[in-house]
Image: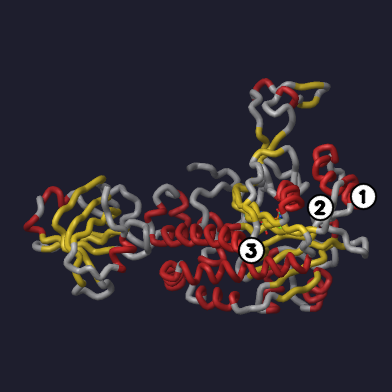
Amino acid sequence: MKRTKVIDILKSTAFGSEVTVMGWVRTKRDSKTIAFIAVNDGSVIHNIQAVVDVANFDTELLKSISTGACVSITGTLVQSQGKGQSSEIQAKKIEVFGTADDTFPLQKKGHTLEFLREIAHLRPRTNTFGAVLRVRHHLAYGIHKFFNDKGFFYLNSPIITSSDAEGAGEMFRVTTLDMDKLPRKDGKLNFEEDFFGKETNLTVSGQLEGEAAATGIGQIYTFGPTFRAENSNTPRHLAEFWMIEPEAAFNDINDNMDLAEEMLKYLVKYALDNCADDLTFLNNMYDKDLLNRLNTVVHSTFKRITYTEGVDILEKSGHKFEFPVKWGIDLQREHESFLVEHFKTPVIVTGYPKEIKAFYMKQNEDGKTVRAMDVLFPYVGEIIGGSQREENYDKLKARILEMGIDEKTLWWYLELRKFGTCPHAGFGLGLERLVLFITGMTNVRDVIPFPRTPKNAEF
Ligand code: 4AD
Ligand code: MG
């Protein structure tokens, strides 16, 4: 079907020429002689207005057009008389693909985001979700561009795996066994009869496979869905989220921080450059400080501190935290926000106690801390988690045993250190946390098309 997208119609100055727009009716205003139909096709936040001379059209056809209907309108592109738009279409031919009666839930503007979550299948037809989905797309493209331009190779790490990359046990099992007749051997579930002949789960991270690739082709990044069965019902956690995990041979923790900072600034700038209309809409609609905040991050220098320094700042602040601060605790959301507020800039914290971090992180000489790094952002808290990796075979193995992890599932990961080991580092960026920050939305459920959270997989 031949049509011109609204984004291109609005750019066109070929007044007098014929165009066809196809899209969904946002509003229709009627008078006896003339009707105005605002059509949106999702290519851009703006609508195009069709001006309809009522006398030239069948009354029943015009009556069938209401908010939510899908139409094709062909007509002459003219310069607009009205305010707020530069061009409009003088309708000559109208076809209705699909009507929408008055049970269509998006009749009026101004629905709450909570309500829109209940109609996740229809929310792409709203301005807000159109904007969010377009920004999300541009960011995904920008991520590929950033890494490609730096010579990183895109690696497709597996979705089904038999290892627990974070050692945290928060996994969704993958099985073809009949749940009603689970085979047991010596009292234990016997996975020998399962599809893969062993226990498997959905991946919690592509990092381990990413390390295998980086220690062969140098620099890689993964970009795929990640699954965590953690029961955290917060505005920042999803059971299914998208993660970008670069891994680079011969990078130490400082190179890792440099890469993370450069990438985040690049992506925020990429969004500002490529999503100006959508970000302006979100800024005006939800958060008047959004554009200002994004620009500030692009021009900032991230503050780098150690965990020990961070804890010191929190302790000396005199602030009463819900979770009391003491060296050794995992930093909570309130602590992270405090540090970001304190420095008024994104903060990178390194050197966490080894007890609260994963088995694969490079151990420092002090025997207490590891070369971990978390990047903390305004509004979203932790946006990146990463580390330099333990490349010493004996130290890694000792840590695995110390943490009670089954080393048999990690034999291949240990071999990366047995043969030609090298210093390397990487991190994981949560795509939804990035989109959250850039769009100014406040709940990750509103930045992914169909959110998966505890007790929620309706669509
Ligand atoms: O800090 P995490 O757990 O780190 C890893 O998975 C490492 N394997 C990364 C690496 O070094 N290659 O997760 C990384 C990021 C977090 O900082 C956060 O942005 C996001 O992933 N994330 C989540 N986003 C949404 N919902 C969840 N449940 C998330 N868990 C982590
Ligand atoms: Mg983390």
Q: Is label 3 or label 1 in front?
A: 3
* Number of the label disc, if any, that sits on residue 150: 3
Instruction: Find numbered disc 2 in the image and state the secondary structure of the residue it sits on.
Output: loop
Q: How is the image coloured?
A: secondary structure
| Label 3 CA crowd tier, 10 Å (few <14, some 14–19, many 20+) | few
Q: Residue at x 22, y 68 (%)?
A: 14
Q: Earlier in the sequence, mark 3 or mark 1?
A: 3
On the rendered structure, is 280 left or right of 74? right
Can residue 233 be seen here? The reply is no
Q: Position of residue 42 (x, y in %)?
A: 36, 57
Task: Judge whether 344 appears above or below 437 on screen.
Answer: below
Residue type, label 1: Asp
Residue type, label 3: Lys
| Label 2 CA crowd tier, 10 Å (few <14, some 14–19, many 20+) | many
In which image quadrant can residue 253 be found? bottom right
On the rendered structure, is 284 left or right of 310? left
Say whether marks 2 and 1 touch (CB < 8 Å): no
What residue sits right under mark 1 in the picture? Answer: 394
Instruction: Find numbered disc 1 in the image and state the secondary structure of the residue it sits on.
Output: helix
Q: Is label 2 or label 1 in front?
A: 1
Q: Residue at x 40, y 59 (%)?
A: 111
| Label 1 CA crowd tier, 10 Å (few <14, some 14–19, many 20+) | few
Residue labelled 1 has its Cβ within 8 Å of some atom of ligand 1? no
* Number of the label disc, if any, that sits on residue 360: 2
Q: Specify the farthest residue to the left.
A: 55
On the rendered structure, is 328 left or right of 140? right
Q: Position of residue 266 (x, y in %)?
A: 59, 69
| Camera-side residue of 358 and 14 | 14
What distance separates the C-alpha of mark 3 from that of mark 1? 33 Å
Say whether marks 3 and 2 touch (CB < 8 Å): no
